[in-house]
Structures are given as C-alpha cells and as structure tokens.
C-alpha cells in the first residue's frame, strides 16, 4: 500500500477454505475502474477466453464478484502490519508457509486436518469482518440503466458470496445445519452465485444416501 496505494484484493474462485488465496492488484496512478461490460469487450480472443475460463473467470460477474475490498479497506486492515520490502520479503516467504503448512497424507490424522481448516476458517472470518467489498471500488459510475442493473446484481452477488463463506466456516466447525441455512440464504440473495447451490445439492445427495 505504500508503493501502490490504489490497490484491491480479490479472492480466487475457490470454495476450499484451506487454500483460499487472496490476490492483490495495485497501481500507483489513478485507481482503475471498469464499465459493466468491460470483460466482454476486452476478452475477444478464444485462446485468452479459454485460459481465463480454466481459472474460473468466465465473465464480468466472476471477475468483479470475487472482489474482497478496495484500497480503503486494505489500508484499514493492514494499518499496523509491517512493510513487505525487498530485503524483508514477508509475503514471498509467508504466503507459501500459510498455504502449505499441512500436507495431507495417509499418516495425517483427521484431528490435525480439522485443526488446520479451523485455523484457516479463523483467517477467513477476519477477512470477512474487515474487508467489505463495494461495487464502487471497481466499477465506473452508474450512468446508464445497464450500469445500475449490473451494480445491483454485483452487490447481491458479493453479499451471497460472503454468506457462502460464512456457511463454509460454520461447516468446518461442525455446525452443519447452520451452514445449510447460510447456503440457502446465499441462494436467496443471488441465484447467480452457484457454489451455494452446489453445496446444497451435495448435502441433499449425502442425506439421500444414508
């Protein structure tokens, strides 16, 4: 944030709490904001479209819908954190340790794995508590009906995504029924956010197989 003050954080499209990456994208010039149809106009090459699709980025909603927070949220979240510098590359060494501190094997106990995921759930909960996404952090001003409608949908999508994350945290902590209620609320908030529907279907299949 010291070098790139106009920064945003994005979650990677991923439902696994234990390996949920946070990507930081920053500039030292004017903050970049995009119209609702930027993705469709920018991604016109089939090869690029397939590569982005393989990473889970299939359209505007998937790109903007994983916004974690804008520069104001990041500044507040990292206010007391030490700087990441060339001679003290905290992120370079800390991120792999955070992501790969446990490797599952036939000898890894279930309790150890659960403790690992609960630890990651606490980290995600801290993000959710402090990183509030706002469509205006990434979108241009809503000057047309199309802009306003997309902003409305994006707002609902972001809310549904965070409710889904809360459901995953509940599930990791063994509160299955509350997690299912969170997934249902997420689907009601935005039917465009598909992971919640997937989790509901998964639980339904699990119950039917008992």
Image (cartoon, helix red, strand yellow):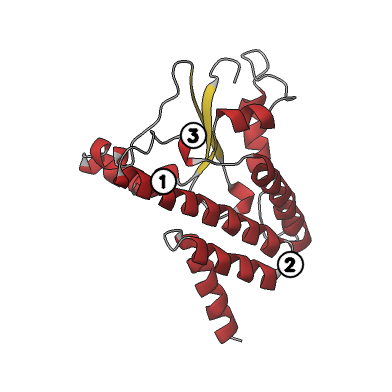
The correct choice, above or below, for 155 with respect to 178 in the image is above
Residue 154 in the image: state x and y as whole percent. 44, 49
Residue 157 lies left or right of residue 61; in this view the side is right
**Does residue 147 lie above or below 205 as drawn?**
above
Between 18 and 64, the one lying in front of the other is: 64
Circle nearer the N terminus (1, 2): 1
34 or 194: nearer the viewer: 34
**Residue 11 is at least partly visible in this image:** no
Disc 1 on helix, strand or loop?
helix
Q: Nearer the viewer, residue 4 or 191?
A: 191
Disc 3 or 1, which lies upstream in sequence?
3
Cα separation between marks 2 and 3: 35 Å
Helix or strand or loop: what does disc 2 sit on? loop
Disc 1 crowd rating (10 Å Cα; few below 14, some 14-19, many 20+) is many
Mark 2 — residue? 174
The numbered disc on residue 137 is 3
Residue tagged 1: 151
85 on left or right of 192: right
Mark 3–mark 1 distance (CA, rounded to whole Å): 11 Å
Residue at (44, 18) in percent of width and height: 30
Report helix, strand or loop for mark 3: helix
Residue sitting at the far left: 45
Q: Are marks 2 and 3 in contact (CB under 8 Å)?
A: no
Neighbour class for label 3 at 10 Å: few (<14), some, many (≥20)?
many
Relative horizontal placement of residue 6, taking residue 74 as reference (left or right): left
Q: Quadrant of the C terminus?
A: bottom right
Tell me where residue 20 appears, x and y as whole percent.
58, 46
Residue beneath the point at 72% across and 57% down: 113
Question: Residue 183: where, in percent of width, then height?
Answer: 57, 66
């Amino acid at each position: 944030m010291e070098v790139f003050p106009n920064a945003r954080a994005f979650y990677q499209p991923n439902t696994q709490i234990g390996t949920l990456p946070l990507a930081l994208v920053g500039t030292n010039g004017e903050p970049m904001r995009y119209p609702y149809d930027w993705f469709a106009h920018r991604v016109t090459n089939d090869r690029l479209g397939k590569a982005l699709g393989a990473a889970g980025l299939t359209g505007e909603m998937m790109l903007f819908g994983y916004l974690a927070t804008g520069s104001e949220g990041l500044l507040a979240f990292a206010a007391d954190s030490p700087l990441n510098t060339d001679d003290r590359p905290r992120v370079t060494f800390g991120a792999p340790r955070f992501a790969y501190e446990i490797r599952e094997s036939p000898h890894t106990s279930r309790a150890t794995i659960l403790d690992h995921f609960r630890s990651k759930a606490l980290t995600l909960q801290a993000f959710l508590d402090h990183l509030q996404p706002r469509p205006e952090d990434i979108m241009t001003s809503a000057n047309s009906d199309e802009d306003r409608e997309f902003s409305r949908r994006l707002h609902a999508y972001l809310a549904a995504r965070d409710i889904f994350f809360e459901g995953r945290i509940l599930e990791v902590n063994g509160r299955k029924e509350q997690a299912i209620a969170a997934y249902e609320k997420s689907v009601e908030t935005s039917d465009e956010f598909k992971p919640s529907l997937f989790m509901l279907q998964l639980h339904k299949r699990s119950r039917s197989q008992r």
